[in-house]
Image (cartoon, rainbow, N blue to C red):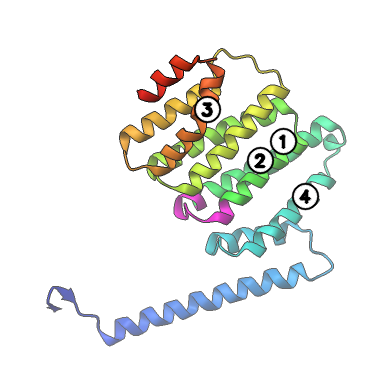
């Protein structure tokens, strides 16, 4: 029976809910203990530990120490490759590294959907792409950053005022600009023009999107510089 429109909860139902909650807490603590035990052991660069960090981060992505353990494990995997003979050459090792990176980037997507404002997920994702820039050929890395720009665009279409997403987008944009210079990517389209148009669309969809306004304010000086705008052209642009 409901009281004032609020369903009553029986003592038995509440008790079962409490038991389930305590069970989850015990499972979580057990998983934390497993990870810490393996980290402190002599054999702490294993796939088993890596999978345990996956489980723990799916449960609690705010546990930033576990992200650091995961970084350490991946760097070990990058440095040592795998045991297959076809990875004894640079091309094979690059493929091995790229596979690890793309698998981990894919792992993060459901976490971002569930925890879109968790700083540690965004930060770790940026680290993965930075590792790609450090270890993989520029042309390969550029494609990963392009995919990332598309992904963050989708995330912002869901929550257009997510300031974590906007900050991340600025970093992705900067990395793409640097790489495009490095690989001499020839394109008639200005990245600044495209990004400015993106802010226009986002503001039109939500006028109170302050993150989009901020991004736009940073792009305007660059945009006018790229256009070689005269004083009068700058005045007209700002008036509009």
The dot on residue 75 is 4
Q: Which of marks 3 and 2 is in front?
A: 3
Secondary structure beneath label 1: helix
Q: Callout 1: 10 Å neighbours few (<14), some, many (20+)?
A: some
| CA gap, disc 3 and disc 1 | 28 Å
> Which residue is pictured at 20% across the width and 80% down the height?
8
| Helix, strand or loop for disc 2 | helix
Give coordinates of residue 36: x percent, y percent. Answer: 71, 71
Q: Distance between the residues labelled 2 and 4?
A: 13 Å
Q: Name the residue under label 3.
A: 221
Q: Looking at the image, do the residues carrying marks 2 and 4 touch, with CB atoms under 8 Å apart?
A: no
Q: Does the segment drawn in magenta span residue 120? A: yes
Q: What element carries label 4?
A: helix
Q: Which of marks 3 and 2 is nearer the N terminus?
A: 2
Indicate the position of residue 84 as horizontal and vertical percent values.
Answer: 82, 41
Query: Circle 2 is placed at which residue position?
Result: 129
Q: Residue at x 43, y 43 (%)?
A: 211
Q: Viewer-nearest of labels 3 and 4?
A: 3
Q: How crowded is mark 3: few (under 14 residues within 10 Å), some or many (20 or more)?
A: few
Residue interval drawn in magenta: 111-121
Res. 82 in view: no
Task: Give the residue at mark 1.
Answer: 133
Quarter of the image that includes the N terminus: bottom left
Relative vertical location of residue 94 with respect to residue 44 in this rendering, above or below: above
Q: Quick one: quadrant of the C terminus?
A: top left
Against 82, is 185 above or below? above
Is 3 or 62 nearer to us in this picture? 62
Horizontal relation, residue 221 to residue 18: left or right: right
Where's residue 28, x and y in %?
56, 72
Q: What element carries label 3?
A: helix
């Amino acid at each position: 029976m409901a009281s004032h429109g609020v369903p009553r909860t029986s003592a038995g139902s509440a008790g079962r809910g409490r038991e389930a909650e305590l069970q989850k807490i015990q499972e979580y603590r057990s998983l934390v203990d497993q990870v810490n035990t393996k980290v402190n052991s002599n054999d702490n660069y294993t796939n088993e530990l890596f999978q345990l960090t996956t489980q723990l981060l799916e449960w609690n992505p705010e546990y930033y120490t576990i992200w650091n353990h995961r970084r350490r494990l991946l760097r070990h995997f990058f440095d040592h490759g795998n045991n297959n003979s076809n990875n004894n050459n640079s091309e094979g090792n690059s493929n091995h590294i790229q596979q690890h990176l793309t698998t981990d980037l894919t792992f993060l997507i459901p976490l971002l959907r569930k925890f879109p404002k968790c700083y540690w997920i965004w930060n770790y994702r940026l680290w993965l792409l930075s590792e790609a820039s450090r270890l993989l050929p520029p042309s390969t890395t550029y494609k990963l950053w392009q995919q990332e720009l598309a992904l963050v665009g989708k995330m912002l279409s869901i929550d257009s005022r997510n300031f974590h997403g906007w900050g991340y987008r600025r970093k992705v944009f900067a990395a793409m600009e640097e790489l495009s210079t490095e690989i001499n990517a020839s394109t008639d389209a200005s990245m600044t023009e495209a990004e400015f148009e993106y802010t226009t669309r986002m503001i039109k969809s939500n006028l109170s999107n302050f993150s989009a306004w901020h991004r736009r304010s940073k792009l305007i000086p660059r945009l006018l510089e790229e256009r070689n705008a005269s004083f009068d052209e700058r005045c007209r642009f700002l008036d509009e």
